[in-house]
Amino acid sequence: MWRRTVSWVSGPLLAAFFLWLCLRGVSLHDLGTQIRGAHPLWLGFSALTVVLHLFLRSWRWRSLLEAVRDRIPYRELLSATSIGYMASLLPGRVGEVLRPALLARRAEIPFAPALATVGVERAVLDLLAVLASGAAALVLPTSISGLSTGADPHLLAQLRVAGGAVLGGALVALALTMLLARHRAAVGAWLEIRQRAMGRLPRLLTGWLASLLPGLAAFATVRGTLRLAWETLLIWLVIGVGIQAGIHSTGVNVPPGAFLVMLPILAAGIGIPTPGGTGTYHLAMMLGLSRLFGVDEAAALGAGVVVHAVTWLPVLAMGGGFIIAGGLGRRDDDAGPADASGAVAS
């Protein structure tokens, strides 16, 4: 009980602290001017990428769940994804558990493997995508990424070597994931035996790894792995383009590949447990744009406020729409699986 209370209280407190860090020394008048001047067409385009992102995540989730149940109704996947993301505004990472719980209820699949696939999304696919984005920013020409354009050439060469190493490491990690997927039953049994002789921290780590194993089934084949890699690349490209468009809407000009630099920075900000990334997302955007691209802090923070808002408004609209349409209710027991496979909500 006390852990739940701490998580619900600490999130808003951390959000308030990081918002204070963002706002100190920034002119509220300049910030307001920056926000009010956002271009509506670019904002609309950025909002559309958020909607597309939810559709693509639902599509990838079905790929991860094919070993559990084939042909899961896409509408149920989209409903659970939208509501789960909306619940991420609540403290305590509620959305991460609510999403598989809703799908398990609505599509009649076991909760444990559904939860495991959400863990695999975060700990494997999205993590590797963010690392690859940062590495690509280091490897690509600075005319595209805009990263360290004024840096010493020798330092820049070293950074590019580091970026290549990270990309290579991501490929190795993907290969290891495939190996684990092919032998997940044996690995699970070995972990269960080893846990009995381990200390508390190693036992927690191995227990976490064991909990992910049921979600790795889609990686067992080369075809399945390539499919997930392609879907993940598409998801994060859409996210990046949406961020770039949102930044551009505020009049902040950055190189065309700036989103490759900003993606890992913003992901690190969201990784700090505040409701919906409030405060941490804004600080990450402000620091990234001002320190790496020379943007004025008020303008950078204004971009963070605008992009954060335009990210969450479509999520709230879609999640709320599915709740109103009965997204939290149990599927009618008299309805067969085919009855729940209606057309994709638009």
Image: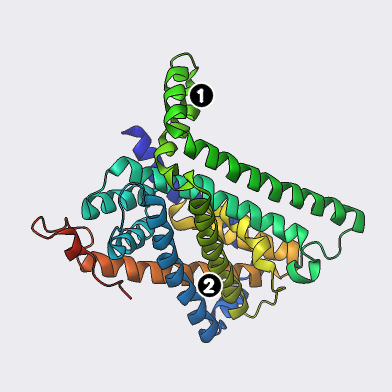
**Picture coordinates of residue 173, whole percent (x, y):** 61, 42
Q: Tell me if residue 149 can be seen.
A: yes
Q: For residue 284, which quarter of the picture?
A: bottom right
Q: Residue at x 68, y 61 (%)?
A: 261
Q: Relative to 35, say whether 275 is above or below.
A: above
Q: Nearer the viewer, residue 344 or 279?
A: 344
The quadrant in which the N terminus is found is top left
**Picture coordinates of residue 154, whole percent (x, y):** 91, 54
Q: Residue at x 51, y 45 (%)?
A: 123
In the rendered structure, the answer to whether residue 262 lies left or right of residue 186 reads right
Q: Residue at x 69, y 51 (%)?
A: 167
Q: List the residue tagged with mark 1.
A: 201
Hey, which residue is sitting farthest left in the picture?
A: 334
Q: Nearer the viewer, residue 216 or 274?
A: 216
In the rendered structure, the answer to whether residue 63 lies left or right of residue 126 reads left
**Picture coordinates of residue 282, whole percent (x, y):** 57, 61
Q: CA distance from mark 1 to mark 2?
A: 41 Å
In the rendered structure, the answer to whether residue 256 lies left or right of residue 105 reads right
Q: Relative to 299, say whether 59 is above or below.
A: above
Q: For residue 216, which quarter of the picture?
A: top left
Q: Nearer the viewer, residue 130 or 186?
A: 186
**Picture coordinates of residue 141, whole percent (x, y):** 80, 66
Secondary structure under tag 1 reads: helix
The disc, 1 or 2, on the residue closer to the chain's N-terminal end is: 1
Q: List the residue tagged with mark 2.
A: 306
At label 1, which amino acid type do we have?
A: Leu
At label 2, which amino acid type do we have?
A: Val
In the rendered structure, the answer to whether residue 18 lies left or right of residue 140 reads left
Secondary structure under tag 2 reads: helix
The quadrant in which the C terminus is found is bottom left
Please state which of the two labelled residues, at mark 1 or mark 2, is closer to the viewer: 1
